[in-house]
Image: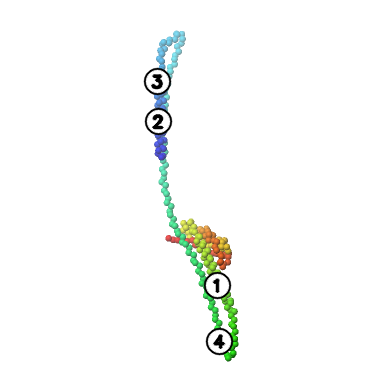
Amino acid sequence: MVEHRYFISFFITTLVYLGLFGSYFILRDTLLIEEQKAADNTICMCLSEFVPPSDAPVEETPKEEPVEEIPEEPAIEEEPVVEEKPQEEPVVEETPKEEPVVEEKPVIVPEAVKPKPAPKPEKKKEPVKKKIKKHIPPKPAAKKMPSPKGAPTQALVKKGTAQKDKVADKNAFLAAVRQKINRHKSYPVIAKRRGMQGKVAAEFTILANGHVSNIKLSGSKFFHASARQAIEKAFPVSTVGRALSFPMTVNLMLEYRLTQN
């Protein structure tokens, strides 16, 4: 496209110069023809035919000086300026290096182990006193009264069982909360690209309505945003039917580790 444009401009310039030269030669020929016609139309007269009287002074006619033609300077041809094409440098496309995709290992949350109920203490059997038979007429046997020591023993057993059930319920509740937080946890993209791993210690309060508040984080700062987002998404939780006291403060450790292929 650029070469075609240069050719057209060169062709137009050549036509302009040819027109100028043609006009110059045509004009010069026209002037020469007019001068030749003027020379042919001149009338030759002899001065002897017109003899003036002797008394009158003879006037001398001034001779016409020949007019020298000034040659016109030929037009200077302008050489066409040829523009040099800028050499285009080859563009080298850089192929982006593919970064290794690191898969995140799922964090396995250990299941809460329910504590085995402690064996109930065996009741001590009271020794039976041997009665010495006497030759006494039989009397109606008196009814045996229950010993007063049995009542406090049963109360202690019930209290210990209730405490164990409460601890088991709390462990199951916290295990469910941990599992829900880990399910909403995501690995930060920048940390995954840099191959970074870390731990975040989280502390938060579970309210009686199942919502969370007072989230505090410490540890690797690259994972703070991910940990906070996972905790907020895991709540609210159901607290109905739980024999637990609320508000409850929970301390939790969240781990971020990359899997190695």
Residue farthest bottom in this picture: 135
* Residue 150 appears in the figure: yes
Quadrant in the rendering for residue 236: bottom right
Q: Which mark is residue 136?
A: none
Dot 2 falls on a residue whose secondary structure is: helix
Frontmost of labels 3 and 1 is 1
Dot 2 or dot 4, earlier in sequence: 2
Residue 130 got which mark?
4
**Label 3 crowd bin: few (<14), some (14–19), many (20+), radius 10 Å:** few
User: In this figure, which residue is indicated by the disc labeled 2?
Assistant: 18
Q: Earlier in the sequence, mark 2 or mark 3?
A: 2
Q: Is residue 79 visible?
A: no
Q: CA distance from mark 1 to mark 4?
A: 38 Å
Query: Would you name the residue on which mark 1 appears?
Result: 161
Q: Is there CB contact under 8 Å for labels 3 and 1?
A: no
Q: Amino acid at mark 1?
A: Thr
Does residue 7 sit above or below 195 in this rendering?
above
Amino acid at pointer 2:
Leu
Q: Secondary structure at mark 1?
A: helix
- Along the viewing direction, whichever of 101 and 83 lies nearer the viewer: 101
Residue type at the position of mark 4? Lys
Q: Earlier in the sequence, mark 4 or mark 3?
A: 3
The residues tagged by marks 2 and 1 sit, at their Cα atoms, a distance apart of: 121 Å
> Which one is closest to the eye, mark 2 or mark 1?
1
What is the CA distance from the residue labelled 2 to the residue labelled 3? 27 Å
**Looking at the image, what colour scheme do you see?**
rainbow
Q: 105 or 83, which lies in front? A: 105
Q: Toward which corner of the image does residue 18 lie, by quadrant? A: top left
Which tag, 3 or 1, sits closer to the chain's start?
A: 3
> Considering only order in the chain, which callout, 4 or 1, is on the residue closer to the N terminus?
4
Q: Which residue is mark 3?
A: 36
